[in-house]
Image (spheres, rainbow, N blue to C red):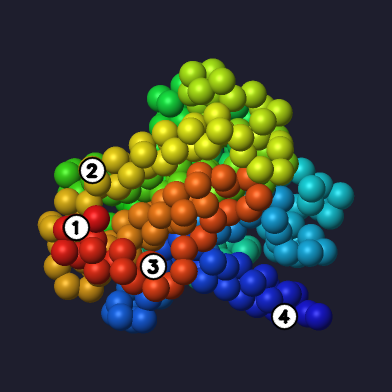
Amino acid sequence: MTVTDTARAVERGTLAKAADENFPVAPFFLPRDWRTDLMAVYGFARLVDDIGDGDLAPGGADAGLLGVPEERADDRLAMLDAFEEDLRRVFDGTPRHPLLLRLRPTVRRRSLTPDPFLGLIAANRQDQLVGRYETYDDLLAYCELSANPVGRLVLAVTGTSTPERIRRSDAICTALQIVEHLQDLAEDLDRDRIYLPAEDMKRFHVQEADLAAPTANASVRALVAFEAQRARDLLSEGAPLLGSVRGRLRLLLAGFVAGGRAALGAIAAADHDVLPGPPKPGKAHLLREVGLTLRGEG
């Protein structure tokens, strides 16, 4: 396989993961240029998360594309450093990685700044160094890096950024991050990460050993229900964002909110037992939530 073939395979493999997200990334009803730019942003966000989680293409392909020696391909901090260097080339040169090459026209067309991209990289660096969060405020500070930049980029790509919209978007994105943490609680624990605030675990009498069980006990379920309600409240706080935009953008944003609500519904349907695996909503449930969200009934 040539370098070009490898690059294309890595690019396709990363972008294909969009189908597994809780929310629509670049649905068909959007203008073509929006879809192109949103997929470019998604490719960046997905790849930086894959680097941080160690979920990269087999054979060290990403490391090679970033110029990281094969013997350091498992060093996530080294990979993130190389990825940041390549990101900076998006703004003042020619990047190495195909997903960053894809991003460069979007950055120029939409006048995007490095800050939200650097925030996502910083979040994944933090994941290598911090595995526990003492307070809910600590977790919110992490979400400011790990989730909120994505919503800000969506607003920037669609040319709709205002301070109030950014505030509402941040609430939605933080909610979606909390939902994902709940769904992936067992998987994250395998990586020695717990995104449940320690103060809440103490309040609900939950020990780390309880999170490693095959199924959740009553205390874990009560804690998951508590955090799920926080996410639901944040989605409600952010939902007025929909009323400030029109047309296809409103439908896209409704998909984000509905995706979070549908995932919360799936968690509730599992009686808040997320330990056997991530509860996922079906398509019918998601479409129903989109309708309710658009009507302001969510």
Report if the CB atoms under discs 3 and 2 are less than 8 Å apart: no
* Mark drawn on residue 297: 1
Looking at the rendering, in which quadrant would you find the C terminus? bottom left
Q: Position of residue 108 (x, y in %)?
A: 36, 64
Q: Nearer the viewer, residue 170 or 121?
A: 170
Q: Which residue corresponds to mark 4?
A: 5
Q: Position of residue 95 (x, y in %)?
A: 57, 62
Q: Comparing marks 2 and 1, which lies closer to the viewer?
A: 1
Q: Nearer the viewer, residue 141 or 231?
A: 231
- Which numbered disc, 3 or 2, marks the residue that appears first in the sequence? 2
Separation of marks 3 and 1 at Cα, in angstroms: 14 Å
Q: Secondary structure at mark 1?
A: loop
Q: Which residue corresponds to mark 3?
A: 285
User: Mark 3 Cα within 10 Å, few/some/many (few <14, many 20+)?
Assistant: some
* Mark drawn on residue 196: none
Q: Secondary structure at mark 4?
A: helix
The amino acid type, in three-letter code, at marker 1 is Glu
Looking at the rendering, in which quadrant would you find the N terminus? bottom right
Q: Residue furthest right?
A: 71
- Which numbered disc, 4 or 3, marks the residue that appears first in the sequence? 4
Report if the CB atoms under discs 4 and 3 are less than 8 Å apart: no
